[in-house]
């Protein structure tokens, strides 16, 4: 029998590596949409989770809509409004970035296996996947010049944290609280999008190297 | 209904976006007074939470709530006149976001669920971002971007830390709704590795928001570019809220028998912040940035106080109250200076004593207070923290602590004396005005009063706040 959970986790790792190698912003946003959907589906495939109540159904539908449609749509709009289609302009090259991703993955495996953490049965793979996703998110924020890739890096970091919080932890009874976290994420991306548009108006570009006036 | 404390400002905030701008200013003031009343009711225990899984009145939360509420009232009076005179572009956004900001901060103080606390702290970042961008300059834009991005990433790490702590709870095989009370009651059964990892992430995460070095880089930019009433609120109220997140996690660590680990971590971050604050104040040429670095330094002092424990804990809470009062007063005075001179450069501001005598008095008195000289309360709190540190044999830490304090006094003294007494041209901007002077004086006066006469109920609330981790003799 196919283990759907492992398939999804491998697909998430694939989106992580793809995002490191992608040269076009629109493609990067699409990869993030796919990753959002995959991450939202993960808890459904775990033992003991599932669509137990009406609240749970509403929550997962809302999460799929926000992570898979709403946030990517806002990002695409931001990309269009600042009229940058290609050129992510890396500080670290694409090939080196993919190599970094593989290094993150190996270190995550090594860390999970060597720490002997007290984890529930069969959840080690989720931890590996989550740590790799978080590390890559932080790396993307540092290694790319365009301000919008920093927003994407932040989203990826959040996806990784979500994997830890929702899939790894068994406290999943309070959907209202998780919805609050999701709402914060949505508003954060909205606020960042608005600032991005303003940066583009003020500087005629969204290059983070332009943002260096304030210092001591 | 305890939830009214944050629901009222939310409702008022929505109204401020719809109503005309003049009414928005009145609304700011009316909400402030309503909020203060609710705060007093909550303080005396007459408000019970409706959703007791999520919200509740803890002594440390109430303390920070009252400080926030009092400061906000003073700032609302100030903003009444400031908003008109500084020609804020989007005043509706300003009033609305100030109210939302008050609401989210109040939500932080009454949160009893770790993730709800996180949601509220992240929300403070999002609603205060427009406040920094109100002046719409390129510099303000850069400050806003850094603020939102650095704080969001930092706070995301705090969420990770909170999840690690809940993972520790999973191992106990208990299915009750999560809350700080539940965590504390089971503290000794929790897995220490997850707790340590979780606490480290929480300190880094909320520490970013609190302005602990080396995660403080957004703070001087945001505090200097925001309009002065917003700066006063950011410095005097928001930093305390982030501290509350760390403090609640620290209580859990102490209950789990890991107090030494968390205390050491807090002392290290605290001392780093003090040193960074001291160094950057010394060479500062922008007086609002100087105040911002002083906030970093003072947050460091609070972290050290909590870290060393015992009488230092009491000192830390006294320090928190007085720092909030004095620093917000200083930012309001700085706002008056900025309105008159139109610049934040230290060398372009001269002769305050002649041109703006009343602002001079509040600015200088604020400096005396923040430098930790009597009769202001920071003298007492810093003294208590040093006593506690010596008692605990933290000799190296005491040396660094005192050195950083001296650096700050020397650096800030140079700036303030230069601005006050140097010969120079009179300012060309807006002059002094009672509405913008009184709040700064009231805040300072409150600090002096609390130093001479501390009401019994405040004293006992502080004792209750620190009782969970051993109180005076811990």
Image (tube, rainbow, N blue to C red):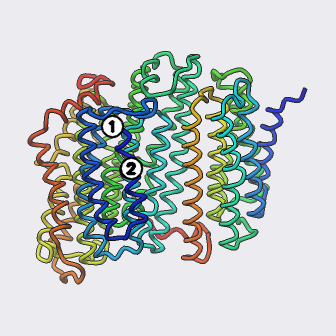
Residue B250 is left or right of residue B440, and the answer is right
Q: How busy is the neighbourhood of tag 2: few (under 14 within 10 Å), some, or many (20 plus)? A: many
- Classify residue A109 by image quadrant: top right
Nearest the eye: B166 or B15: B15
Indicate the secondary structure of the residue bearing disc 2: helix
Q: Is A164 on the left or on the right of B303, as rendered? A: right
Residue occupying image coordinates x 36% and y 43%: B4
Question: Which of B19/B272 is in front?
Answer: B19
Q: Residue at x 15, y 50 (%)?
A: B446
Q: Give the chain letter at badge 1.
A: B
Residue, disc 2: B103
Asked whether A43 or B316 is in front, the reply is A43
In which quadrant will I find the N terminus of chain A? top right
Q: Chain of mark 2?
A: B
Disc 2 to disc 1: CB gap under 8 Å: no
Which residue is pictured at 52% across the width and 32% down the height? B198
Residue A205 in the image, given as x and y percentages of width and height: 62, 74
> Closer to the N terminus: mark 2 or mark 1?
1
Does residue A202 appear to the left or right of B286 in the view shown? right
Residue B400, image quadrant: top left
B421 or A184, which lies in front? A184
Residue B250 percent across, percent down from the top left:
40, 31
Q: Name the residue tied to disc 1.
A: B61
x, y percent for residue A192? 57, 60
Q: Residue furthest right?
A: A1
| Label 1: element kind | helix
Distance CA(mark 2)–CA(mark 1): 14 Å
Up/down of B151 relative to A12, above or below: below
Compared across the picture, whether B231 is left or right of A3 comes to left
Given this view, does label 2 or label 1 mark the residue nearer the observer? 2
Q: Is residue B393 visible?
A: no
């Amino acid at each position: 029998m196919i283990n759907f959970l492992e398939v999804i986790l491998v697909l998430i790792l694939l989106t992580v590596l793809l995002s490191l190698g992608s040269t076009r912003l629109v493609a990067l946003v699409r990869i993030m949409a796919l990753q959002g959907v995959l991450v939202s589906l993960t808890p459904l495939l775990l033992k003991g989770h599932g669509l137990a109540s009406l609240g749970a159904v509403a929550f997962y539908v809302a999460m799929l809509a926000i992570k898979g449609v709403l946030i990517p749509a806002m990002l695409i709009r931001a990309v269009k409004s600042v009229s940058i289609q290609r050129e992510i302009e890396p500080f670290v090259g694409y090939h080196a970035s993919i190599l970094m991703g593989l290094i993150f993955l190996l270190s995550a495996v090594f860390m999970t296996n060597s720490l002997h953490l007290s984890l529930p049965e069969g959840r080690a793979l989720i931890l590996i996947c989550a740590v790799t996703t978080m590390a890559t998110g932080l790396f993307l924020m540092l290694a790319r010049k365009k301000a919008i890739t920093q927003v994407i890096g932040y989203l990826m970091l959040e996806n990784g944290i979500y994997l830890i919080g929702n899939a790894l932890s068994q406290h999943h009874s309070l959907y209202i609280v998780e919805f609050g976290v999701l709402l914060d994420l949505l508003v954060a991306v909205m606020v960042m999008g608005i600032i991005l548009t303003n940066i583009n108006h003020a500087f005629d570009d969204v290059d983070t190297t332009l943002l260096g006036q304030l210092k001591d | 209904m305890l939830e009214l404390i944050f629901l009222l400002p939310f409702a008022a905030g929505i109204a401020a976006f719809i109503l005309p701008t003049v009414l928005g200013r009145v609304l700011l003031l009316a909400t402030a007074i309503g909020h203060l009343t609710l705060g007093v009711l909550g303080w005396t225990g007459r408000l019970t939470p409706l959703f007791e899984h999520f919200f509740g009145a803890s002594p440390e939360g109430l303390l920070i709530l009252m400080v926030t509420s009092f400061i906000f009232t003073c700032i609302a009076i100030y903003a009444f006149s400031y908003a008109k005179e500084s020609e804020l572009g989007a005043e509706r956004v300003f009033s609305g976001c100030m109210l939302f900001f008050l609401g989210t901060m109040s939500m932080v103080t009454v949160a009893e669920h770790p993730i709800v606390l996180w949601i509220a702290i992240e929300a403070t970042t999002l609603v205060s971002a427009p406040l920094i961008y109100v002046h719409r300059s390129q510099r303000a834009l850069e400050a806003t971007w850094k603020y939102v991005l650095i704080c969001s990433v930092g706070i995301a790490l705090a969420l990770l830390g909170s999840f690690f702590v809940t993972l520790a709870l999973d191992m106990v095989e208990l299915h009750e709704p999560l809350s700080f009370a539940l965590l504390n009651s089971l503290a000794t059964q929790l897995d220490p590795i997850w707790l340590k990892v979780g606490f480290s992430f929480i300190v880094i995460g909320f520490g970013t928001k609190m302005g602990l070095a080396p995660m403080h880089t957004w703070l001087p930019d945001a505090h200097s570019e925001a309009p002065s009433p917003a700066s006063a609120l950011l410095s005097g109220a928001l930093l305390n809220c982030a501290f509350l997140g760390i403090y609640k996690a620290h209580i859990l660590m102490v209950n789990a028998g890991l107090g030494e680990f968390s205390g050491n971590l807090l002392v290290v971050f605290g001392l780093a912040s003090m040193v960074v604050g001291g160094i950057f104040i010394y060479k500062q040429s922008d007086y609002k940035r100087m105040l911002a670095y002083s906030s970093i330094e003072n947050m460091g002092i609070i972290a050290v106080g909590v870290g060393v424990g015992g009488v230092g804990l009491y000192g830390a809470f006294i320090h928190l109250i007085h720092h909030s009062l004095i620093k917000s007063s200083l930012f309001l005075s700085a706002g008056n200076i900025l309105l008159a001179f139109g610049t934040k450069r230290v060398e372009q501001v001269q002769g305050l004593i002649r041109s703006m005598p009343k602002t001079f008095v509040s600015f200088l008195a604020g400096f005396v207070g923040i430098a930790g000289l009597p009769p202001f309360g920071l003298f007492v709190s810093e003294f208590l923290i040093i006593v506690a540190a010596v008692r605990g044999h933290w000799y190296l830490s005491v040396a660094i602590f005192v050195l950083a304090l001296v650096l700050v006094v020397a650096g800030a003294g140079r700036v303030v004396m230069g601005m006050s007494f140097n010969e120079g041209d009179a300012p060309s901007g807006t002059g002094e005005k009672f509405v913008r002077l009184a709040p700064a004086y009231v805040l300072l006066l409150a600090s002096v009063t609390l130093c001479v006469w501390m009401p019994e109920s405040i004293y006992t609330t502080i004792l209750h706040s620190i009782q969970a981790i051993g109180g005076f003799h811990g």
